Image (cartoon, rainbow, N blue to C red):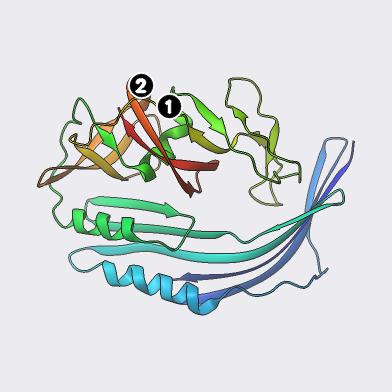
Amino acid sequence: MSELYRKWGRSVRRENGRLIHVDEAGDASDDAGVFRTRPTDEQIELAWPDSDAIDRAAREIEGMVKPPLLLERLFVSEANVAHDCNGIRWSETPRRVHVAIARPPVRALVDLADFEFDLVQRIADALLRAGGEREAPKRLRVAESVGAALLPLLAIERRQIAAPHDGKGRRIDERLVTSMQPPNWFRPSYRLRPRRAWFHVRAEELGEVDEGLPEAIALLAPVGEAVQLLCVEGDRVFPAAVIPARRPPLAARPSRRWYPYAAGTFGTELMI
């Protein structure tokens, strides 16, 4: 079976203090297992995102990071994107924010899909008080943004939330996440072959989160088998490592805020 996917996009991103405008179109074909991609000259009418809003968002973050903190990486973007897969057409307007704030040797990572930055301010304030690494507390509360990143790794009941389109334009139905092959397709770029994935994953509510526990408020490195976290316990702020596979969640409280991890996850406050 042959498949032709086409994508058009206009994006604006602010990086290293500069606004960069990108107007791009390309297609990907999959014919009898042979996958090919190419840029194209075909254009459709797409509006440019609001450059001023993107610039303001970046400047807001820059104003939160003051010495001795360093803003090592700041990427703020918005795009207007149109898709076509074998005649099924849809569009989206994604926003993405990636921030790396350092107080060497500690470095906090933040990934967002909106321009709300209370979390960035909280992490910057905590880094000013960060001390040396400590052993992770036996019981730990995990902020919803960190929980969103950990969710694909955890042994907890999860649900795929419905949405109009996956990477092939097919409807995404609500269903429990299982060990079976996901029914939908994720396409992060037209240059990559799509893969099956669970979309917009949300944890099922579980138990009651103890508000008095130490809290992990940020990732200090990309998620792996062991996860480096920035933890707050009273007046103390410290890095600590946990292995999610050894800490089955004792409680989970999902939120409605969406984060750009995997094919999309919703924030989840956890107790592990």
Residue receiving disc 1: 154
Quick check: 89 left or right of 97? Answer: right
Q: Toward the viewer: 10 or 22? A: 10
Examine the image and state in which quarter residue 145 appears: top left
In the rendered view of the protein, which quadrant contains the C terminus? Answer: top left
Q: Residues within 10 Å of mark 2 (few under 14, many from 20)?
A: some
Label 2 SS: loop
Q: Position of residue 211 (x, y in %)?
A: 22, 36
One can see residue 16 in this view: no
Q: Are marks 2 and 1 in contact (CB under 8 Å)?
A: yes
Q: Position of residue 201 (x, y in %)?
A: 53, 36
Residue occupying the point 26% across, 66% down: 65
The dot on residue 248 is 2
Amino acid at circle 1: Leu
- In the rendered view, would you say 5 is above or below 254? below
Give the CA distance from mark 2 to mark 1.
7 Å
Q: Toward the viewer: 108 or 158? A: 158
One can see residue 271 in this view: yes
